[in-house]
């Protein structure tokens, strides 16, 4: 199926001509090179922050500053190569989560993807009473309708604001969402099973805030046929990680 027949992906006032998000792959796999290449093709390129400062000379002695410096540099390098949509993936479990979120927002990235934990609270350094004024969109990554409900309910209460989209990762995603080994092949935990729960959890908040919240599927998606299948299930976009690792533009070494 041609991608031209698939709708564009809209997140607030952002519009990706191709509804594909390149998953954030840490420790040097997806940085400015891959991110800008995907953005230039009309998708959403994503810089991963896990281990981003590993090549800074002071990473072991000045961890937070080394990571912020490296992230800032990669965002600016990506921006120099593309006018497309770029995002940053930040794991909630990181000890410097707040600093990295603030750094990405300060640099004006288009989208923040927040996973590996529940982003129930945002950094207090952000203008939490006017999140809608920021250029950056906030997109949590979840693995269940329950997780989506907790996040949306918490943000609505704390900030009178809800996430701008949500990524749903099934057990085949190479992420950090805590599926058990026996759940990987369990038909009760497939992405197809989880998606309707998340769509249902998000729907009342869309109505309450009069806001369109795209749901994005992730985990085990490889081909145009896969994309079409999930669009038919009600998602507005997909996230692919592994497919991009073997590309020339990937930031990993050619040997890898």
Image (tube, rainbow, N blue to C red):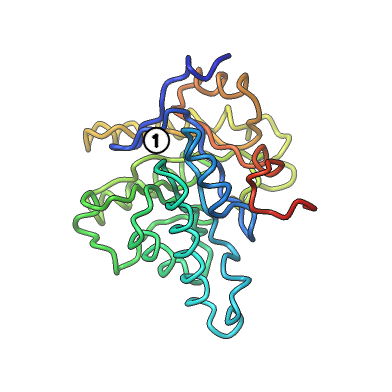
Picture quadrant of residue 122: bottom left
Q: At 48% from the left edge and 14% from the top edge, which residue is drawn?
A: 5
Q: Position of residue 240 (x, y in %)?
A: 59, 37
Q: Secondary structure at mark 1?
A: helix
Write down the residue under mark 1: 201
Q: Position of residue 133 (x, y in %)?
A: 21, 51
Q: At 41% from the left edge and 42% from the top edge, which residue is drawn?
A: 85
Picture quadrant of residue 214: top left
User: Relative to 61, does residue 84 appear above or below in the rendering?
Assistant: above
> In the image, 180: left or right of 111?
right
Q: At 57% from the left edge and 65% from the top edge, which residue is drawn?
A: 52
Label 1: few (<14), some (14–19) or many (≥20) C-alpha neighbours in 10 Å: many
Q: Nearer the viewer, residue 249 or 196?
A: 249
> In the image, 176: left or right of 196?
right
User: Relative to 145, does residue 236 appear above or below in the rendering?
Assistant: above
User: Relative to 160, does residue 212 appear above or below in the rendering?
Assistant: above
């Amino acid at each position: 199926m041609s991608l031209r027949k698939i709708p564009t992906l809209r997140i607030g006032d952002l519009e990706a001509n191709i509804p594909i998000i390149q998953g954030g792959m840490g420790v040097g796999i997806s940085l400015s090179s891959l991110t800008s290449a995907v953005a230039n093709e009309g998708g959403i390129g994503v810089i991963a922050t896990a281990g981003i400062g590993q090549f800074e000379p002071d990473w072991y002695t000045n961890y937070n500053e080394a990571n912020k410096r490296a992230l800032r540099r990669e965002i600016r390098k990506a921006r120099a190569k593309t006018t497309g949509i770029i995002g940053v993936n930040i794991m909630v479990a990181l000890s410097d989560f707040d600093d990295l979120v603030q750094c990405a927002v300060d640099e004006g990235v288009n989208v923040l993807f927040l996973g590996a934990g529940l982003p129930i609270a945002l950094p207090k350094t952000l203008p939490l009473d006017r999140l809608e004024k920021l250029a950056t969109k906030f997109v949590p990554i979840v693995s269940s309708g329950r997780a989506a409900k907790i996040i949306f309910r918490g943000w609505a209460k704390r900030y009178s604001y809800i996430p701008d989209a949500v990524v749903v990762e099934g057990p085949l995603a190479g992420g950090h969402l805590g599926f058990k080994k026996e759940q990987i092949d369990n038909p009760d935990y497939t992405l197809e099973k989880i998606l309707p729960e998340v769509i249902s959890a998000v729907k009342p908040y869309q109505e309450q805030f009069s806001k369109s919240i795209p749901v994005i599927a992730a985990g085990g998606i490889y081909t145009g046929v896969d994309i079409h299948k999930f669009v038919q299930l009600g998602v507005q976009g997909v996230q692919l990680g592994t497919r991009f690792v073997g590309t020339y533009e990937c930031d990993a070494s050619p040997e890898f």
